[in-house]
Amino acid sequence: MLTLSHFNAALLFSVFASTVFGITQRDTPRDQFRYGLYCFAMFMGGLIVAGWVMWALRH
Amino acid sequence: MADQVARKEVVAPAPVTHLSHMSILAPALAWLVPGAGHLIQKRWIRGSLLMGSIVIMFVLGLLMQGRVYQPNGGDVLDILGFIGDLGSGGLYIITRTFDLGHGIVAHATADYGTKYMIVAGLLNFISMADAYHIAIGKKC
């Protein structure tokens, strides 16, 4: 059984989802790459922010 | 005569859609084999990236002992899970054929795996729509 930490699972999820979003939501290769990076940054940023919010709620 | 000219100016041109065999074949193939709808239209890099992303995500979900939903008429979340899984097309058929995807409920990683497989299917739905848009000429 493959065991991933929550962070690693979210990181891989972000990579694959961003790739598909980038390719399908924009027309030119340059825009696709930029949008893919944007989605990845949003995924990871959201993950870190959500993590800190949960930490703050608990303490 | 002047009336006819005025009428020609008012009538907007009908939107051009290039319906062809490809517009049916590409999304159908994209459902069966993720990324194949782009590959058949010679979008080699896009198709390969889509195929890699969706297939790897689904396989990772299986390796994490994720659960594959079966057709059901019970809980709404179970029905939605089945619809998500069904998006993976050929991958879902293979998984069901070999009786894989019996998730370990009491393990967090298995839950990640279940979500991975659902999202892989949903991403494949987006990929199918993109293949269709390329086939009708709406996207280059």
Image: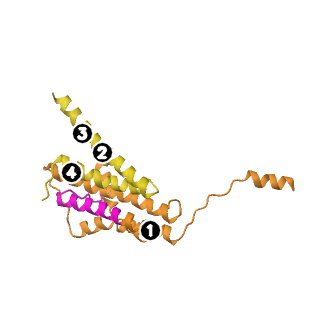
Chain colours: A yellow, B orange
- Packing grade of label 2 (10 A; few <14, some 14-19, many >=20) is some
Magenta-highlighted residues: B48-71
In this view, the mark in front (4 or 3):
3
Answer whether residue B81 is magenta in the image: no
In the rendered structure, find residue B26 and report the number of the disc placed on it.
Answer: 1
Specify whether residue B3 is in view. Answer: yes
Separation of marks 4 and 3 at Cα, in angstroms: 13 Å
Q: Are marks 3 and 2 in contact (CB under 8 Å)?
A: no
> Which residue, given by chain and number where applicable, does mark 4 sit on?
A9
Could you say whether the residue bearing mark 4 is in a helix, strand or loop?
helix
In this view, which residue lies farthest toward the front? Answer: A30
| Precedes in sequence: disc 2 or disc 4 | 4
Q: Position of residue B27 (x, y in %)?
A: 43, 65
Q: Residue at x 21, y 57 (%)?
A: B67
The type of residue carrying mark 2 is Phe
In this view, the mark in front (1 or 3):
3
Separation of marks 2 and 1 at Cα, in angstroms: 30 Å
> Which residue, given by chain and number where applicable, does mark 2 sit on?
A43
| Precedes in sequence: disc 3 or disc 2 | 2
Q: Residue at x 74, y 51 (%)?
A: B10
Left or right of B86: which side holds B98? left
Separation of marks 1 and 3 at Cα, in angstroms: 38 Å
Give the position of the N terminus of chain A as an image quadrant. bottom left
Q: Tell me, yes or no, whether dots 4 and 3 are on the same chain.
A: yes
In the rendered view, tell whether residue B6 sits above or below residue B28. Answer: above
Could you say whether the residue bearing mark 1 is in a helix, strand or loop?
helix
- Packing grade of label 3 (10 A; few <14, some 14-19, many >=20) is few
Q: Position of residue B99 (x, y in %)?
A: 20, 67
| Precedes in sequence: disc 4 or disc 3 | 4
- Packing grade of label 4 (10 A; few <14, some 14-19, many >=20) is some
Q: Residue at x 29, y 48 (%)?
A: B77
Tell me the subunit letter for badge 4. Answer: A
